[in-house]
Image (cartoon, grey):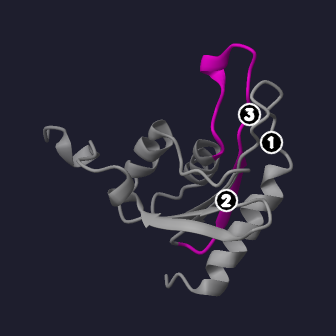
Amino acid sequence: MVLTSELKQELLERAAEARRWAYAPYSNYPVGAALLAESGKIYTGVNVENVAYPHTVCAERVAVFKAVSEGERHFTAIAVVTVNAKVPCGGCRQVLAEFGLDTHVLVGDPDGNLITQAVLRDLLPDAFTPADLPRR
């Protein structure tokens, strides 16, 4: 799937829209994500915090888990929108790496502006992937 500028903008807008539903009463750092599967379907996610912090889930992982729960395994791009346009955390990078290091990562602000973009392999050098496990 070709990642056109129009498609990038749609992903950023969907992530910004999803961000409204984030549950972030502790950090006050709402995050929205929009994940584009190779099928063309877009899955959104938001961060969901919990008073017991280890049980908090990031927006990127919510989007991935939604997509995987519906049978998707290959992703083209993910857009992430935060107040200060930060890239996904290490844990989210690792979850995304499970499904391919060629995923494009788009980072935007709440107004849907593209601030930065990268390919996952550049954000997670020397990634540990399924290929690193011994074969049966």
Q: Nearer the viewer, mark 3 or mark 2?
A: 3
Q: Position of residue 123 (x, y in %)?
A: 38, 53
Q: Are marks 1 and 2 in contact (CB under 8 Å)?
A: no
Does the image show residue 107? yes
How far apart marks 1 and 3 lie (CA) works out to 6 Å
Question: Residue flagged by tag 1: what amino acid is it?
Answer: Ala
Q: Are marks 1 and 3 in contact (CB under 8 Å)?
A: yes
In the figure, is residue 24 to the left or right of 123? right
Give me the disc on residue 48: 3
Q: Which residue is mark 1?
A: 22
Quick one: 84 or 26, which is closer to the camera?
A: 84
Question: Earlier along the polypeptide chain: callout 3 or callout 2?
Answer: 2
Q: Position of residue 9 (x, y in %)?
A: 69, 77
Give me the disc on residue 43: 2
Q: Which residues are magenta?
A: 39-59
Q: Position of residue 72 (x, y in %)?
A: 53, 59
Give me the disc on residue 2: none
Question: Residue flagged by tag 3: what amino acid is it?
Answer: Val
Quick one: 17 or 129, which is closer to the camera?
A: 17
